[in-house]
Image (tube, helix red, strand yellow):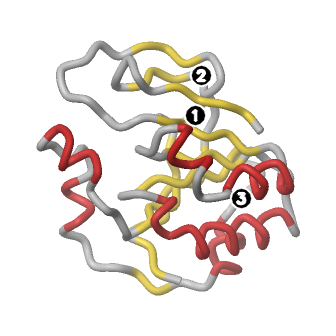
Amino acid sequence: MQVKDVVTTVSDYKETGLLVAFPKCTFKCCKETNFCQNSELTKQENIEIDVYNIVKMFNPEIHKALIFGGLEPLDSYVDMMLLIEAFRGKYNRPVIIYTGFTEKEVESTGAFAWFNFFGNIIVKYGRYVPNEKSHFDEVLGVNLASNNQYAVKY
């Protein structure tokens, strides 16, 4: 599978996580707001990596969650689900998906069935909107950049 990066993060969840940045995006945010908060990622080369190598990078002594961000994780839906399946074979830690999609848009993909099947999945919904006030999200335990963003646990 292709990713932009795999790094340890302390800013996307209330505990330390392993962040997988996915390379695909339909740029819905950009079309609506003329701004992409992940524009620097678009300039990075894609990295080819096996899902099992990503699972091996997850250190349960350090990482408390596997986090998907990117550009748009749901635009890499098949790879994302394969990675969740491989991860669930070894860990039942939270999987967090940072999406710019709305809940209604995700519902139309059929992803809810997978979220419920795998369980312990948190989805952060909502596109970034520039100049909106940030707010604390109880589910993630971090500040989100826009008022329209929120997280749901499945």
Q: Which residue is mark 2?
A: 141
| Label 2: which secondary element | loop
Image-based side of 94 in relation to 34, left or right: right
- Image mark for residue 13: 1
Q: Check the image and report above or below for 30 versus 50.
A: above
Q: Position of residue 30 (x, y in %)?
A: 19, 48
Q: Check the image and report above or below for 124 versus 111.
A: above
| Label 3: which secondary element | loop
Classed neighbour count for the residue bearing mark 3: other residues with Cα under 10 Å, few (<14), some (14–19), many (≥20): few
Image quarter of the C terminus: top right
Kind of residue indicated by mark 1 = Tyr
Image-based side of 43 in relation to 55, left or right: left
Within the image, what quadrant is residue 22 found in? bottom left
Image-based side of 65 in relation to 142, left or right: right
Q: Residue at x 15, y 43 (%)?
A: 35
Q: Which residue is mark 3?
A: 59
- Image mark for residue 93: none
- Lower sequence index among marks 3 and 2: 3
